[in-house]
């Protein structure tokens, strides 16, 4: 039965509204970051080649996470080819700048519906990939801080200052997120999460297994290393010669912990404030306090511009739709 013509216009209007909302949130984020960066680093010389390298490393790291996202969808009853899965993964990252983080799921489900993925499956795959990514990030950060120890992070709670060892904090976050994605635990959590939504049953869940989790950890660890090297490139763009090789594990650990902590404290869009705060503290031993602030802000600007650029390209380059017989 053919759908009424007005439904197509409604869908187009909704897609346009989502797109405008995302672009508005990204624009606000860029303007705010650029303003902060100019205030902090007005006398800093920036090498654009290394900034571009930082953006390219970031997109490469995201792509490894996206491959695992495609692997999760492959393990479902509505599998999707890797190319559209990776495309949806990269484009939808812009949605994290909309407060609440739900826009990522909305965008990903919308981009994959034409390729046969059930919205609920795309949502569960998003949650599983994200939690696995965070678990790997915690472990990567713990290893980095073990190789290159730094002073504890002082947290102010009311009138008390509590020193928090970064190695223990990272390890605790890694273990906590890993327990959530354990194949015997995550399906039960998903069942609880799907209860309020009618028509979402066990068939919407991918087939979770220890092998899938192991694959996810490997892809995610490699992704975190590239994200950390993105920060190394950004520092090199600001500081001639960049950080010494011996400090690279610390930089990688700093980026991983900052991002995981930003996700754990989901009050701010895209980990805003929390991520920068951790980076300020952990990068200070590498480049000094002032340049640590500038490096963290430059990294955020580099990442959001890279996300915007790859999303613009992939919005034009679209994989062919599957034939009806393939759905």
Image: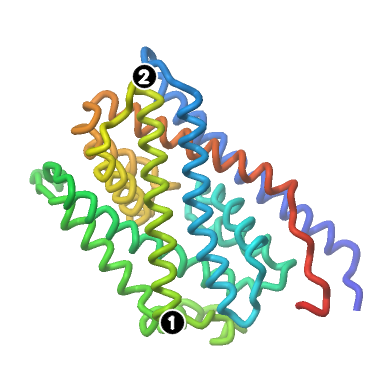
Task: Name the quarter where the N terminus is drawn.
Answer: bottom right
Residue at 67% of width from left, 65% of height from top?
112
Task: Name the quarter where the C terminus is drawn.
Answer: bottom right
Q: Position of residue 217 (x, y in %)?
A: 38, 66
In this view of the protein, can residue 31 be seen by the observer?
A: yes
Q: Position of residue 203 (x, y in %)?
A: 58, 86
Labels 1, 2: front one:
1
Judging from the image, the colouring scheme is rainbow
Tell me the quarter of the picture where residue 308 sits. top right
Q: Position of residue 286 (x, y in %)?
A: 22, 32
Q: Label 1: few (<14), some or many (≥20) within 10 Å?
A: some
Tell me the quarter of the picture where residue 113 sits. bottom right
Q: Position of residue 245 (x, y in %)?
A: 27, 37
Residue at 35% of width from left, 78% of height from top?
182
Q: Label 2: few (<14), some or many (≥20) within 10 Å?
A: some
Residue at 40% of width from left, 78% of height from top?
186
Residue at 62% of width from left, 84% of height from top?
199
In this view of the protein, can residue 198 be seen by the observer?
A: no
Q: Which mark is residue 209?
A: 1
Q: Which residue is mark 2?
A: 41
Give me the C-alpha separation between circle 1 and circle 2.
48 Å
Label 2: state its secondary structure: loop
């Amino acid at each position: 039965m053919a759908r009424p013509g007005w439904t197509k216009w409604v869908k187009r209007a909704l897609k346009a509204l989502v797109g405008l909302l995302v672009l508005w949130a990204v624009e606000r984020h860029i303007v705010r970051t650029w303003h902060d960066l100019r205030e902090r680093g007005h006398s800093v010389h920036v090498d654009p080649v290394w900034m571009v390298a930082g953006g390219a490393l970031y997109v490469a790291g995201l792509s490894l996470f996206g491959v695992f996202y495609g692997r999760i969808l492959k393990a479902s009853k509505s599998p999707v080819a890797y190319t559209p899965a990776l495309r949806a993964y990269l484009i939808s990252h812009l949605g994290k700048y909309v407060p609440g983080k739900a826009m990522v799921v909305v965008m990903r489900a919308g981009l994959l519906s034409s390729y046969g993925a059930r919205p609920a499956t795309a949502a569960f795959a998003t949650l599983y990939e994200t939690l696995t990514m965070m678990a790997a990030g915690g472990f990567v950060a713990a290893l980095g801080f073990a190789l290159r120890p730094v002073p504890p992070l002082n947290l102010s709670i009311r009138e008390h200052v509590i020193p928090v060892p970064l190695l223990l904090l990272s390890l605790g976050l890694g273990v906590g997120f890993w327990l959530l994605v354990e194949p015997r635990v995550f399906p039960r959590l998903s069942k609880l999460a799907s209860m309020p939504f009618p028509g979402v049953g066990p068939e919407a869940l991918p087939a979770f297994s220890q092998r899938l989790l192991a694959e996810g950890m490997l892809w995610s660890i490699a992704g975190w290393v590239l994200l950390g090297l993105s920060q190394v490139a950004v520092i090199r763009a600001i500081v001639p010669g960049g950080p010494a090789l011996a400090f690279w594990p610390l930089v990688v650990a700093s980026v991983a912990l900052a991002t995981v902590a930003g996700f754990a404290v989901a009050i701010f869009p895209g980990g805003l404030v929390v991520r920068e705060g951790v980076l300020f503290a952990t990068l200070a031993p590498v480049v000094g306090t002032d340049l640590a602030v500038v490096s963290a802000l430059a990294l955020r600007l580099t990442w959001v511009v890279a996300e915007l650029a790859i999303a613009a390209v992939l919005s034009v380059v679209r994989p062919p739709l599957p034939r009806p017989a393939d759905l």
